[in-house]
């Protein structure tokens, strides 16, 4: 095994948030079906982008950038 072999080089993965048209196509999947319960206080688009960022980059929950919701909120929606 060579240390400089290209197959062992880690590449930085690029992340791009959803465009407006992409979010419009999937927005209906995230809306509540009933009017019961508390209204959602978190922007679901930013939650979805945060979860995509975690999956795409492989970063730890506690190292998510500040532009996304807190890691505990992301974890709640991930588990849901």
Image: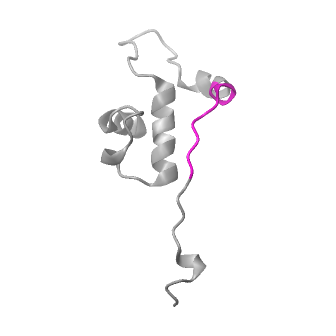
- Residue 46, relative to residue 65: is it above or below? above
Q: What percent of the width, then of the height, locates residue 50?
A: 46, 38
Please give the name of the residue rendered at 34% of the width and 47% of the height, measured from the top-left corner. 63
In the picture, which quadrant includes the C terminus? top left
Instruction: Look at the magenta stretch and give its main secondary structure.
Output: loop
Furthest residue toward bottom = 1
Q: What percent of the width, then of the height, locates residue 5?
A: 57, 83
Tell me which corner region of the image, top left, top right, bottom left or bottom right, holds residue 66: top left
Please give the name of the residue rendered at 48% of the width and 53% of the height, measured from the top-left corner. 57
Look at the image and say whether residue 17 sits in the magenta stretch: yes
Q: What percent of the width, then of the height, locates residue 67?
A: 42, 33
Please give the name of the residue rendered at 52% of the width and 51% of the height, measured from the top-left corner. 56
Q: How is the image coloured?
A: one colour
Q: Is 77 situated left or right of 14 in this image?
A: left
Please give the name of the residue rendered at 52% of the width and 89% of the height, measured from the top-left corner. 2
- What stretch of residues is rendered in magenta? 14-23
Q: Is 79 situated left or right of 32 in this image?
A: left
């Amino acid at each position: 095994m060579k240390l400089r072999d290209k197959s062992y080089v880690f590449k930085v993965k690029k992340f791009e948030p959803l465009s407006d048209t992409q979010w419009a196509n999937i927005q209906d999947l995230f809306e509540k079906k009933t009017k019961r319960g508390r209204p959602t206080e978190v922007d679901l688009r930013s939650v979805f982008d945060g979860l995509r960022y975690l999956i795409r980059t492989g970063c730890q929950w506690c190292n998510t950038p500040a532009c996304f919701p807190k890691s505990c909120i992301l974890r709640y929606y991930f588990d849901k």
